[in-house]
């Protein structure tokens, strides 16, 4: 489902070139949940940005469902990401001027799904995350855990092949994180999405099917303390 081959990315910091990814390789099967761990600054978020096509690699390739994202121009990457990839962020990234259902429907609107079909799909996915009764609430009236559940619903409403989650519990307290975790994992698995999670949360990482650690720019099996 996801193939990462010899992926490299560097950034210039003054006179110094910082190589964040150094010929990283990984393969993720369809429907698999992969957790990527590593110290702060190791390149985990950069990896997700390259996989989603938000950023471009210096070299190497990323393929999602057989489509090579790294070979696409920016407009094609944007359209592909919009149709086939969902993204859950640490800080929710909900639009405060839209209510809960409108935030979820926004992704459908961008994909040309509007009217009654969009309303039905958004309410169905909100029901799946336990928030159908808050469909017309302002997002700033929700708790942090509820906002993240809205973000999960938004990421999955268009039934993407690939779901990317960047520290999805990082902005939540421990109890709320434990409540959101089954929602993220359960809903993605029930819909057959391949899920890649970047996380510092040990419980979340261990709930995944597999863990890889990003060390010195490469993806490898985790050390004993993370296994």
Image: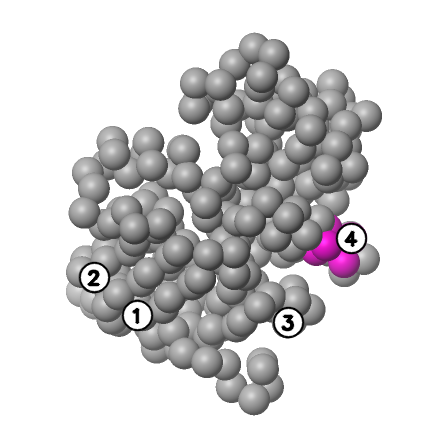
Left or right of residue 25, residue 185 in this image: right
How far apart marks 3 and 1 lie (CA) works out to 22 Å
- Would you say residue 179 sits in the magenta stretch? yes
The mark nearer the N terminus, 2 or 4, is 2
How far apart marks 3 and 4 lie (CA) works out to 16 Å
The residue pinned by badge 3 equals 206
Q: Which mark is residue 179?
A: 4
Q: Say which element carries label 4.
A: helix
| Residue shown at 58% from the left, 17% from the top | 117
The residue pinned by badge 2 equals 60
**144 relative to 99, above or below:** below
Which residue range is magenta in the image? 178-182
| Residue shown at 25% from the left, 49% from the top | 68
Picture quadrant where residue 208 is located: bottom right
Picture quadrant where residue 54 is located: top left
Q: Say which element carries label 2.
A: strand
Query: Which quadrant holds the C terminus?
Result: bottom right
The spot of residue 200 in percent (x, y) is: 58, 67
| Residue shown at 35% from the left, 50% from the top | 65
How far apart marks 1 and 2 lie (CA) works out to 8 Å
The mark nearer the N terminus, 1 or 2, is 1
**42 relative to 117, above or below:** below
CB under 8 Å between discs 1 and 2: yes
The residue pinned by badge 1 equals 24
Q: Say which element carries label 1.
A: strand
């Amino acid at each position: 489902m996801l193939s990462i081959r010899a992926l490299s990315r560097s950034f210039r910091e003054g006179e110094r070139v910082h190589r964040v990814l150094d010929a990283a390789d990984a393969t993720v099967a369809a429907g698999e949940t992969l957790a990527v761990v590593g110290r702060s600054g190791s390149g985990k978020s950069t990896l997700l940005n390259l996989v989603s096509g938000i950023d471009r690699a210096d070299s190497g390739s990323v393929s999602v469902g057989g489509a090579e994202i790294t070979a696409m121009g920016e407009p094609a990457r944007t359209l592909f990401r919009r149709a086939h990839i969902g993204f859950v962020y640490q800080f929710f990234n909900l639009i405060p001027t839209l209510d809960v259902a409108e935030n979820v429907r926004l992704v459908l609107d961008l994909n040309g799904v509007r009217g009654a079909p969009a309303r039905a799909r958004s309410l169905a996915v909100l029901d799946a995350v336990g928030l159908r009764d808050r469909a017309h609430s302002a997002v700033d009236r929700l708790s942090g855990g509820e906002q993240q559940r809205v973000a999960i619903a938004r990421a999955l409403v268009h039934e993407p092949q690939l779901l990317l989650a960047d520290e999805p519990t990082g902005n939540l307290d421990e109890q709320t994180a434990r409540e959101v975790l089954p929602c993220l994992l359960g809903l993605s698995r029930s819909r057959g999405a391949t899920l890649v999670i970047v996380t510092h949360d040990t419980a979340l990482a261990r709930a995944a099917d597999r863990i890889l650690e990003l060390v010195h720019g490469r993806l490898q099996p985790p050390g004993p303390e993370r296994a």
